[in-house]
Image (cartoon, rainbow, N blue to C red):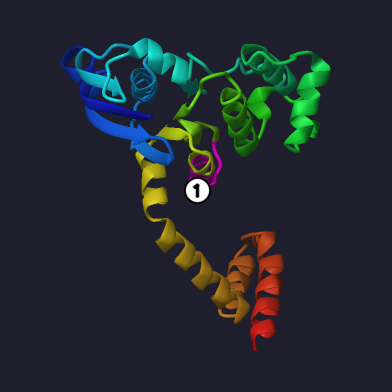
């Protein structure tokens, strides 16, 4: 499956969504940057066949067929469109999505489903308080249970917090399972993902410096000035020293 948006826009003078072109296909995860409160959702609606563009074309496998797109593409967690009500318990969200997928949707089935993904302890947590990674994993896994779904359009996963590389890894995981995945997020998340290699190299260099004791003086000076050391520094230093000692 290949979905292509070519020179689409929405609203007067493109205010709801300026001129945009992108494509995503089976076995691929794509990130599209969209900012302001409204634009990510508008782009998600267009990319999943749930809204008609004011300009440009949207096709699935070369055909303008929005009904087919709606059957094949799940719109995940789009604000005010497909996101769960913030007060609903996690198990309740799961039960509802299992029902949409044609599965048993009673409380026991919902809890069993959560347990199968290591989320049983979150069953009675309101969805708004579920950690970002667990929330997105559950909503995506439940979406692909629906018959015929081969693509995911996920809207603004960064609004829940967490590290962008975490949900980007999730997108890549679904792509490796032969789903077409479009993630729509802000430019800060886009920058983080584009510079993943550099960020990892910086983190590794900092870890090596800590292991060699070269950052301890700075941490000590900060503590003496009234600052509070980060609680993970000591544990990180210890693990890093062990790793280096093991290499020597």
Q: Main secondary structure of the magenta part?
A: helix
Image side of residue 227 versus residue 9, left or right: right
In terms of depth relative to the viewer, which is nearer, 105 or 222?
A: 105
Residue topped by disc 1:
165
- Residue count near mark 1 (Cα–Cα under 10 Å), binned few <14, some 14–19, many ≥20: some
In terms of depth relative to the viewer, which is nearer, 215 or 226?
A: 215
Which residue occupies 58% across, 32% down? 136
Q: Quadrant of the C terminus?
A: bottom right
Instruction: State the image coordinates of residue 118 (x, y, percent, origin top left).
Output: 76, 38
Instruction: State the image coordinates of residue 25 (x, y, percent, origin top left).
Output: 37, 34
- Say which element carries label 1: helix
In terms of depth relative to the viewer, which is nearer, 115 or 82?
A: 115
Q: Quadrant of the N terminus?
A: top left
Image side of residue 63 versus residue 134, left or right: left
Q: Is residue 238 above or below residue 49?
A: below
Q: Which residues are magenta?
A: 161-172
Q: Give residue 101's quadrant in the image.
A: top right
């Amino acid at each position: 499956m290949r979905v292509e948006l070519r020179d689409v826009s929405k609203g007067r003078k493109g205010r709801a969504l300026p001129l945009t072109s992108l494509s995503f296909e089976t076995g691929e995860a794509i990130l599209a940057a969209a900012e302001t409160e409204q634009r990510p959702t508008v782009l998600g609606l267009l990319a999943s066949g749930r809204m008609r563009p004011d300009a440009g074309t949207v096709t699935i496998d070369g055909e303008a067929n929005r009904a087919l797109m709606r059957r094949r593409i799940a719109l995940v967690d789009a604000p005010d469109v497909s996101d769960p009500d913030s007060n609903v318990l996690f198990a309740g969200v799961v039960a509802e999505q299992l029902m949409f997928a044609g599965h048993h949707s009673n409380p026991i089935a919902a809890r069993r489903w959560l347990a199968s993904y290591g989320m049983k302890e979150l069953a009675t947590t309101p969805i708004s308080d579920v950690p970002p990674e667990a929330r997105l994993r559950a909503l995506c896994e439940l979406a692909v249970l629906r018959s015929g779904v081969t693509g995911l359009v996920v809207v603004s996963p960064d609004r829940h917090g967490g590290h962008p590389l975490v949900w980007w890894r999730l997108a890549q995981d679904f792509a490796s399972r032969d789903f077409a995945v479009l993630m729509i997020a802000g430019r800060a998340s886009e920058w983080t993902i584009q510079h993943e290699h550099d960020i990892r190299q910086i983190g590794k260099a900092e870890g090596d410096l800590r292991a060699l004791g070269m950052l301890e003086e700075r941490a000590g000076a900060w503590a003496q000035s009234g600052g509070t050391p980060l609680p993970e520094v000591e544990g990180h230093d210890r693990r890093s020293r062990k790793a280096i000692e093991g290499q020597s």
